[in-house]
Image (cartoon, rainbow, N blue to C red):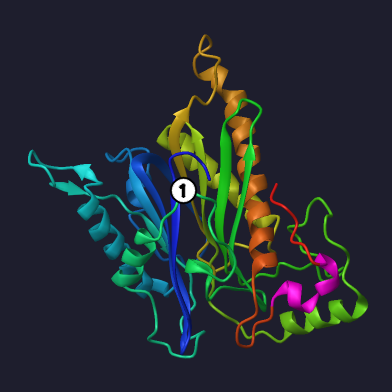
Amino acid sequence: MIDGFEVGHATADGDGWLTGTTVVLARAGAVGGVDVRGGGPGTRETDLLDPSALVERVHAVVLTGGSAYGLAAADGVMAGLEGLGIGLPVGAAPGEIVPVVPAAVIFDLGRGGTFRNRPDAGFGQAALEAVRPEDPERGCVGGGTGATCGGLKGGVGWAEATLPNGARVAALVVVNAAGSAVDPTTGRLWADRSGRLRTPTTDERVALERARSGSAPSLNTTIGVVLTDATLTKAQARKVASVAHDGLARAVAPVHSMVDGDTVFCLASGRRPLSDDHDRGWAGHVPALNTLLEAAAEVFTAACLDALLRAEGRGPWRSYAELAPSTVGHEIPADR
């Protein structure tokens, strides 16, 4: 886990439910940025992350199912943070605070069987209570419980990397895309850029193509958060979020359609300097920022791969690992 952050999930899986909520907590606050690319986004408090806006720090980000209804989960996170005394001071008296909690949703309504079963404030509160400083649980959990991707089961993925200067960057992604994650010619996952997985057999390719072609058109959305311990400005954080979309485009095709609401946040805890080259001012930071941008895109792709490999079939949606078991063997490839 990246210093300064904790992640928690609330999952509802079964008895008409297939949805959930994920919270990324920054107890000490974090500089935030966001880039919304999809044609059908569901978001909350994203305008606050504009570099020209007043608020400088974010206290949590919510990634949740439930489409626009699921934005209510952020209410529970806000209430929980208020109880913890975490938020933006807006008055002289103790406790006069407003937690800053941007949120984004995926469309998963009715995927568990009951349309009205969707996250509410209680999900946000439960996810906040479950936060831990360790690497998060992945697969069919939290905001990725009801996720799908081009006819396959999607889910939550995680990947991280350490940069040459010691700064760390990670991506937490909910893969729920209308586009496909599979190359139709080879049956390989687009996100497997290093070729770690075996090529599917002919029968497995047929099964994967059947899953893709047999899926009904759906509203979707891939959402995620890039986390870093580097010190960034709001403008730099927005740039990181923007370039992370490149990582999504390497994992799913097509992306950013009118039925996707693809949204990526960036949170920077500021635990270490972006660069040690202070003598040249902003010019000294450019190489380090470029390195961070490159890594952000790479870990976002790797997190998408992690989500697709850790997903487990639910209802009519089978996972990639279930349809092409020979590609993964008994081990899921390690994160980048």
User: Would you say 252 lies left or right of 120 here?
Assistant: right
User: Residue 9's x, y, as percent?
Assistant: 45, 64
In the rendered image of this protein, does residue 187 appear above or below residue 81?
A: below
313 relative to 331 in the view: left or right: left
Q: Quadrant of residue 291 in the image?
A: top right
Residue 321 lies in the magenta stretch: yes
- Residue on which the image places disc 1: 133
Is there any visible trace of residue 70 in the rendered image?
yes
Q: Residue furthest right?
A: 202
The residue lying at 67 percent from left, 84 percent from top is 215
Where 32 falls versus 255 (above or below)?
Answer: above
Residue 62 is one of the magenta-drawn residues? no
Magenta highlight: main SS: helix
Name above or below for residue 109 compared with residue 39. Answer: below
Q: Nearer the viewer, residue 186 or 219?
A: 186
Question: Outermost residue, top direction?
Answer: 279
Q: Is residue 247 above or below residue 312?
A: above
